[in-house]
Image (spheres, rainbow, N blue to C red):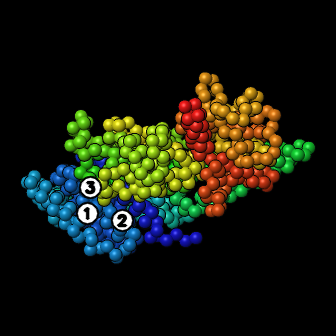
Amino acid sequence: MTTDPADTFRQEARDLLEQLEQALLDLDQNPNGDGLVDTAFRALHTIKGSGAMFGFTEVSEFVHEFETAFDHVRKGRTRISAELVTIALNAKDHIARLIAEPGQNTAAGEPILKSLCAIVDSRVDDAGLPASGSPAADEVKPGQTATTWRVTFGLPGDALVLGTNPVLLLDELRALGPCAVAALTEQIPPIEEIEPEACYLIWDVVLETAAGREAIEDVFIFLKDDMDLSIAPIEGGRSARPSATGDEPRTESQAAPAPKAAVGNAGKPAASEKASSSLRVPAERLDELMDRVGELVIAQARLSQIAAAGDDLNLKSVVEEIERLTSGLRDTTMGIRMVPIGTLFGRFRRLVHDLSDELDKQVEFLTSGEETELDKTVIERLADPLVHIIRNAVDHGLETPERRGSAGKAAKGTVRLAAVHTGAEVAISITDDGAGLDADRIRAKAEEAGLIPADSTLPEQELYQFIFNPGFSTASEVTSVSGRGVGMDVVKRTIEGLRGTIDVSSKPGEGTTVTLRLPLTLAIIEGMLVRVGAGRYSIPLSAVEECVELPASVAARDRGRNFLNIRGNLVPFLRLRELFNTSTSAELHQKVVIVSTGEQQVGLVVDQILGNNQTVIKSLSKLHSDVETFSGATILGDGTVALILDVGHLVRFGHSFEDRLRSEQTGRAA
């Protein structure tokens, strides 16, 4: 399959634009941050060069003007301000549009550049420095005289393969002033050892310019980490300049050092090993690989069952080896699909920045746990739910600066986004220090909508869940951001579609925390296989805490309180035989599997525990999409199907069932 060079540029540009955005947002929070301006400038410089190389002329021209204006910031002539960052972010968005739709948005860049230049020029004029103009105006300082420099550089061995054009580098040096260039050939190996794609030449340049060393280093701004570069002033000026052909005799002291990065062993590029340490792979191929591994796990389970039924020791030995290899392949493949959640968190910094401007609120956005890894499919589907929750936190959660001041709070509100591993799950929490949820208002709205009877008693945790109902909103006014009750129901459907759960906690006047609990992966999990009647079911092993025997006294009791005393804690339990309408007789010694989600526990009464197995998750059909008790199905080793229990739903159902039972008993007693 041939890769389109334009697609390669788009992929690389997305990474660079994200890097640029994060640098700009960091500058907004910390204008004097070390290296942030250079990071932003380096991203712009790379996009400009790559855009010209791959035919994105509009991108290259726009970025050139953007870069020229932003260069004043890099040289300390213009101070970072919130206004400058906002316009720079708009410019970044315009670059993304030019890349996505070439030729469609060119004119929209002119007002952005005018606004950017207006800020830069006014700041430069205020400082008494020359305004932005030609490159010479940027580089030459008043009263500065020309200096002659010897610049010797050797490119990394893989520079040509990665698209670096040394001619363009030499042209940038010539733009700084008169120079003579000599190509040195000492490092070129015999022809039979030459690697066609390697770079062996060393360039020796004598440059006369009024610009300083910094301007020369800028020519190599995104190469100098991997190349050999020597920049030194020359005593005597022009007399030391080599001829353009490099024929002028050179003394030993003038000879350029051989670049270590240019040539490796046996004439091969040393940097090529570093360049090949990572590989960009289409996501579709990873999905296909995961499907193949899933089928292999099913086939291996079937083979293990066949071998266990026989007495062939050789077959059993081979099956054990295949099981070991399959397990390793499964873990490796799942590891490939795991992505740090920080790749998702970075997007929301821009969201909060724009919302704070739009709503005229001061917001500090804090993140933690960026290194926490999740399956790439989970991360892709998490973006929209998190956007809705964060928008609500900023719009409805945080008060205006005036209200915060009257409540004795700091004018700047805080939104925290955190991720942490909890067993085989990841808990993602969004916390604000705003006014908190109004439980009475939610109750009144739920009664008005007919969701609960009037004067009913519900725990606050259940009341808070009503905010995820379609069209449910307690906002006193509708804003351009939120308030119509649209979006939170989509959040709940998406999270439940990922086999996750949502917990909401809130304290009046102190803030609200929304916690999303999600499985690490959607593909293959470890499961506990149980039997209820004639049916077999799989329980995600990550949710299982322990297994106990159902006491005979409790098993014989058909009615009453369904609680078990587990080391002093009362845990409600569900009889799955009753829940699934099983017609067969119950086992004499039934077992209880204690499962949990978050801080809540529930016991699941089963007839038999069959053991653990690798569970390849298969989605249920659309006809069964409304069956909440099951989150999917898996194929067992004998080819039969076992349903996977939705632990989150069963835990919630178990606790609500006990609450209803308690209310009924209280009513009868009264």
Quadrant location, the C terminus: top right
Residue at horizontal 63%, vertical 23%? 567
Residue located beneath label 3 in the image: 358
Is label 1 in a helix, a strand or a loop? helix
Q: Is residue 401 above or below residue 173?
A: above
Task: Give the residue type that dot 2 points to.
Answer: Ala
Give the left or right position of residue 575, taking residue 367 as reference: right
Q: Residues within 10 Å of mark 2 (few under 14, many from 20)?
A: some
Residue located beneath label 1 in the image: 66
Task: Give the residue type that dot 3 points to.
Answer: Glu
Question: Foreground mark, 2 or 3?
Answer: 3
Give the left or right position of residue 238, taking residue 345 as reference: left
**Mark 3 or mark 1: whose residue is earlier in sequence:** 1
- The answer to whether any part of residue 313 appears in the image is yes
Picture coordinates of residue 364 (x, y %)? 30, 43
Residue at horizontal 31%, vertical 57%? 478
Is label 2 in a helix, a strand or a loop? helix
- The answer to whether any part of residue 314 appears in the image is no
Task: Give the residue type that dot 1 points to.
Answer: Phe
**Mark 2 or mark 1: whose residue is earlier in sequence:** 1
